[in-house]
Amino acid sequence: MSERPAPGDVIVGEQYYILASELAADLPKLVLKHDEAFVVANRRGDLPNVAESEFGFYVDGTRFLRQLELRIHGHRPIVLNAGVSEDAMQASIDVTNPDVPLSPQVVLPGRSLRVARRLTVHAGHCYQLLLIESFTREPHDLVLSLTVAADFVDVFEVRGHPRERRGELLPPRVDGGAIRLAYRGRDDVLRTTTISFTPAPHKLDADGAEYRLTLQPGGSVELTVAVGAASEPGGAPRR
């Protein structure tokens, strides 16, 4: 029988062993894996911005995305249910909205929406499908935002072994419906994270995307987020 991990530890396959911080250890996790890529998310389906935590999207031992957080009118959603498939490549998460004040006179009641989040890890990519369904009797405007960030640390740094010297985070680029985050490592490898949104959001910058949607009674909207990781030796000139 294999040894059980200590509380607060996450073991993914046989290659990666990540020690969680005390704060992150208190948060339930969803772990997905395919080949050399894996995701550690919370039960909302987010990669939350928690200091010294193992949450993120990793490929070949590097964290290519450390934050991907969903907000509904600026509020964290409430988890209805969450689970991982038997092959550990997919997760199904259903969340809903809390009571949200839209104005001094108008409140969007809690559970007016259901957001079905479907996460998939495959071949060095992480895909997320969001299906937003309305249960209100009147049309209403919805503001949905997704915040992103990358740090390109390796699993040893995540485990609490910081490097004395690191490479260079390059300026982010926003092009069409995608954000490109990049890092030039001291090993002369250019690592890039490309986050693509479909359809294109109403607002897009280096920090994430914002959608402003009008939902009809009983209506639904579908969005997708695709995260791709790439590594290219000598792929960009030094500054």
Image: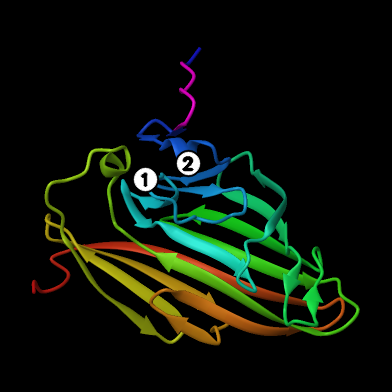
Q: In the image, 226: left or right of 168?
A: right
Q: In the image, 79: left or right of 7?
A: right
Q: Is residue 237 magenta?
A: no
**SS assignment at label 1:** loop
Report the residue at 67% width, 53% height from top: 93
Q: Which mark is residue 52?
A: 1
Mark 1 or mark 2: whose residue is earlier in sequence: 2
x and y percentages locating residue 157 in the rendered image: 26, 43
Q: Give the amino acid type for the residue marked by disc 2 in the picture.
A: Ala
Work out whether 115 lies above or below 87. Answer: below
x and y percentages locating residue 10 in the rendered image: 45, 34
Report the residue at 35% width, 34% height from top: 15
Work out whether 128 lies above or below 174. Answer: above
- Whole-angstrom CA distance, mark 1 to mark 2, is 8 Å
The quarter holding residue 71 reads bottom right
Q: Which mark is residue 24?
A: 2
x and y percentages locating residue 49 in the rendered image: 45, 56
Q: Is residue 6 magenta?
A: yes
Q: Give the amino acid type for the residue marked by disc 1 in the picture.
A: Glu
Report the residue at 12% width, 55% height from top: 187
x and y percentages locating residue 207 in the rendered image: 41, 74
Q: Residues within 10 Å of mark 2 (few under 14, many from 20)?
A: many
Q: Quadrant of the C terminus?
A: bottom left
Work out whether 118 lies above or below 222. Answer: above
**Nearer to the camera, 3 or 48:** 48
Q: Residue furthest top?
A: 1
* Contact check, label 1 and label 2, Cβ < 8 Å: yes
Q: Residues within 10 Å of mark 1 (few under 14, many from 20)?
A: some
Q: In the image, 146: left or right of 112?
A: left
The quarter holding residue 21 reads top left
**SS assignment at label 2:** helix
Q: Start and end of the magenta stretch?
A: 3-9
